[in-house]
Image: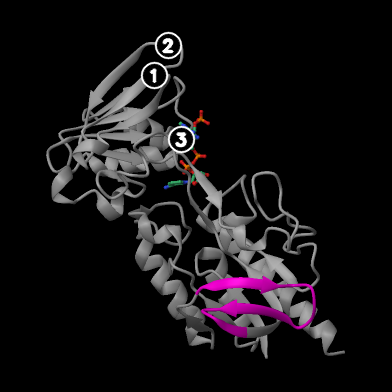
Amino acid sequence: MEKVVIIGTGCAGLTAALYTARANLSPLVLTGIMPGGLLTTTSIVENFPGFPEGVDGYELMTRMQKQAERFGARVQFATVEAVDFSRRPFTLAVDGEPVQAQTVIIATGAGHRHLGVPGEDILEKKGVTYCATCDGALPMFRNQPLVVVGGGDSACEEATYLTRFASVVHLIHRRDSLRASKIMAERTLANPKIKPVWDSVVTEVLDPKLDKVTGVKLKNLKTGAESTLDCAGVFVAIGHVPNTQLFTGKLDLDEAGYVIPRQGAQTNVEGVFVAGDCSDHIYRQAITAAGMGCAAAIEAERHLAGLSQ
Ligand code: NAP
């Protein structure tokens, strides 16, 4: 039986892995389908303390994993399909095999929110994408007009990155001011290749009949005017949804699906702890996720110490 199973290998999961490994708990750390989490899809992380020149997101996560493994964390490429928290030890179905655990740390992170408009799903990977760093350099986007949707830090980061390849980047935002941090917003709006389209939403992605993206239909929310904008790619950066479907009915979740943390990193089930973006819709930073992972690890360690007394 495992003392600690950690679900997720983003900043939260790998920090929990580091701390529980250093407490000699030999944690089993399950990656899910995206080892390293969302940060692996980012380019340069400029706000993680300790890296004055910034650090590549993939490299940061690789280093975190190596650091945890150095102290005995066992990172396994595997997906949790079901959990049973109703009896102890807890049971997880991991790639079809049962795994028993005394404590579980949930650090499943969040995924990309979709626009939910016609043409979006059918043209995914045919011009619609949720990750500029992953897909921006593809030949189909070179020297083409591209669209980024959103007004937060992600949208600004994606738009700026895409100016390397695109002829022009249209930044579509539903309001007339960016939500992004001041430094990112200023940098974005100062870029001559980025053209903001304010107060507007994408209502349709064109053209499924041609099996590729040729443009978007837009609606101006202030005037009601509708228009079409030609583009070869649509990069959607409108926030995230927590990866918590697995825990519906098993843990207390809020209306948006985030695990509700209690007294720090605890959940409503004793022995199940939570950390990172799957329980945080406020801060959502790499460093806060890491801090929450640390807290969850300390809580799990204390819980195990209590069990053995
Ligand atoms: P976010 O801050 O939640 O911004 C989402 C943006 O999408 C908002 O501008 C929002 O509009 C818009 N939006 C939401 N739903 C929409 C819809 N259905 N249709 C059209 N627009 C929609 O998300 P994020 O940019 O992914 O950032 C998430 C967190 O990660 C933030 O805390 C951010 O600071 C952090 N982050 C940091 C960095 C960095 O520092 N390098 C990079 C990326 C992300 P409204 O503004 O009108 O709500």
Residue highlighted by disc 3 = 180
Q: Main secondary structure of the magenta part?
A: strand
**Label 1: which residue?**
219
Could you tell me how far apart the alpha carbons at marks 3 and 1 are, in whole angstroms? Answer: 22 Å
Q: Nearer the viewer, residue 111 or 165?
A: 111
Q: Which residue is mark 2?
A: 224
Range of magenta residues: 79-98
Q: Magenta includes 96?
A: yes
Relative to 47, is 158 on the left or the right?
Answer: left
State the SS at label 1: strand
Residue 25 in percent (x, y) is at 65, 87
Q: Give the colouring mode of the picture.
A: one colour
Residue type for callout 1:
Lys
Residue 47 relative to residue 217: left or right: right
Residue 8 at x, y percent in the picture: 54, 69
Of the numbered discs 2 and 1, the one sitting upstream in the chain is: 1
- Report the residue at 34% width, 50% height from top: 131
Q: Determine if the C-beta at disc 3 is less than 8 A from ligand 1.
A: yes
Identity, as a three-letter code, of the amino acid under mark 3: Ala
